[in-house]
Image (spheres, grey):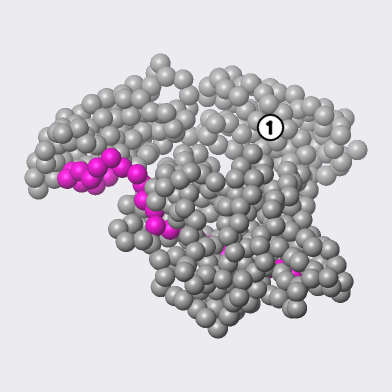
Amino acid sequence: MIKYFLLLTPLLWLSNRSYAQSAPGSVPANPISCNASFCTTNANIDICPPGSNIVVTNFQGGTFNAATQVYRFTDVALVNGQRVHATVSVDATYRAILQSVDDDAAVDQGGISIASFFAPRISPDQNLGATDRDGYVQFTVRFYLHVDNPVSNNDFTVPAVLANLNYVHYDVDGSMTGQRWFRETGVFREAPPLTINGNSNTELVAYQYTGDASTWRGFAGSVCERDGVSRCAEVAVAGQYGVAQSFITYRMGYNYESGGLATNFGQPTRQYGGRFGCFEFPSQSTLPVHLLGFTGRYNGGSAILNWTAENEVKFRQYEVERSVNGTDFTNVGLVNPAGGPGQTKSYELKDNLSSVNGNAFYYRLKMVDLDGKFTYSTTVLIRRSSKAISGIVINPNPIVSGNATVRMTAVSKGMVDLRVIDFTGKVVLTQKATVYEGNNSISINNLNRLQPGVYTLQMIDEAEVSTCKFSIVR
């Protein structure tokens, strides 16, 4: 479970944020017969299909990032030596309350920890009674490549595109008394080709609907309650993506039918659970060359790239590629191999950045063999300076009249976002500004609208977040 002192700010943020709220569409069909004592394990829904890369995610210790309004999880997976991070955003709620974004204390039906699962806790937004009601919380999970040491904001900028991505939602169950039932639901936003799979012994009911300019497909739960977050195939559903993805959007919710009863059913908080797995990085080929390391540094106006490789068999060349946004790469140099079978060789390439705008640069190696097949290295980040923005000072501080100026030094011209955040973590003021190389002064507008207290100013550029605190007195 994310500890309460970490949850305090996110939950305050959740209570103040405005969400797009849309009804979940068509009501699922009535529940089918079920038996809580039945449990199928080791089914294909719970393991990676034959031939796939058996990598599963580890969502533990997430923290809320006020600057980007997402929950960040570091090192959710290690794929072919590449560290992968993730963010979870809460896109929408409809007649539901997110009580906890990820409960690391959750256990499965055998009492075994599932701390590695993405495990939110969700409840209806009111007591249930005589009126039928449906609701959900919508999440988007995004994956990113690790590019910086130690982990920083840069590690949540370069999307990790994952092939064969598979997401399993476990324990989609509930309860039923007479004709009244409460059951969980789980639906995927359509991203063709998307295959929704249930086990042949499933107790779930498939349904789909259209809303928010998307098609949503998934299942409504069993009404036979199981212990913990059950991993039994009878109450699990998997979504398998046929095209490589860097994110998915998913709704976890509930379906309540009163059955004509007016008595108070309460406001049950449900433990949900899911995990990602069976994925890998899409690549064009597997080359005989083995890359042992790839690093970079900034020195004297140039990026210095170094790498070491072995077993260069039927290998043509290394192509060094650069990007200023982490997505669009261009070739900046070619290096011919100098080794052979069983040999280890080291290489260096200098990329002159004196005429290139920007402060952050992303590099990767494209390794090409003699028949044109190729694969990419991991991405490394090089900065022109240690910090794009430094020396932030607010004057006056404390602020009495409602007028203030922020002064700072920038290494290059660019746009920055200014955010003022109160003690609860809520963004109370935003402003955009252009900064120029050298010393800058920016007037902060509308501070007279804020109540006395202590605030945090964030200045966000393309690569990092800089902060300072100030106070307002009257």
SS class, disc 1 = strand
Examine the rendering and report whether any part of residue 10 can be seen: no
On screen, residue 84 versus residue 23, left or right, reads: left
- Residues packed near mark 1 inside 10 Å, few (<14), some (14 to 19) or many (20 plus): many
Q: Residue at x 50, y 39 (%)?
A: 157
* Farthest-out residue, left: 341
On screen, residue 146 versus residue 153, left or right, reads: left
On screen, residue 229 versus residue 147, left or right, reads: right
Q: Residue at x 23, y 45 (%)?
A: 286
- Work out whether 79 lies above or below 309: below
Amino acid type, mark 1: Leu
Q: Residue at x 20, y 29 (%)?
A: 335
- Work out whether 11 lies above or below 411: below
On screen, residue 6 versus residue 104, left or right, reads: right
Q: Which residue is mark 1?
A: 418
Q: Residue at x 36, y 61 (%)?
A: 49
Examine the rendering and report whether any part of residue 208 can be seen: yes
Coordinates of residue 361 in the picture (x, y in percent):
42, 30
Which is more toward the observer, 319 or 459? 319
- Is residue 287 found inside the magenta-colored segment of the image? yes
- Work out whether 357 lies above or below 449: above
Q: Which quarter of the figure has residue 383?
A: top left
Coordinates of residue 363 in the picture (x, y in percent):
36, 33
Q: Quadrant where the C terminus lies?
A: top right
Coordinates of residue 449 in the picture (x, y in percent):
86, 34
Q: Which quarter of the figure has residue 135?
A: bottom right
Q: Which residues are magenta?
A: 268-294
Q: Quadrant where the N terminus lies?
A: bottom right
Coordinates of residue 195 in the picture (x, y in percent):
47, 53
Which is more toward the observer, 2 or 355? 2
How many marks do you count on the picture?
A: 1
* Farthest-out residue, bottom: 37
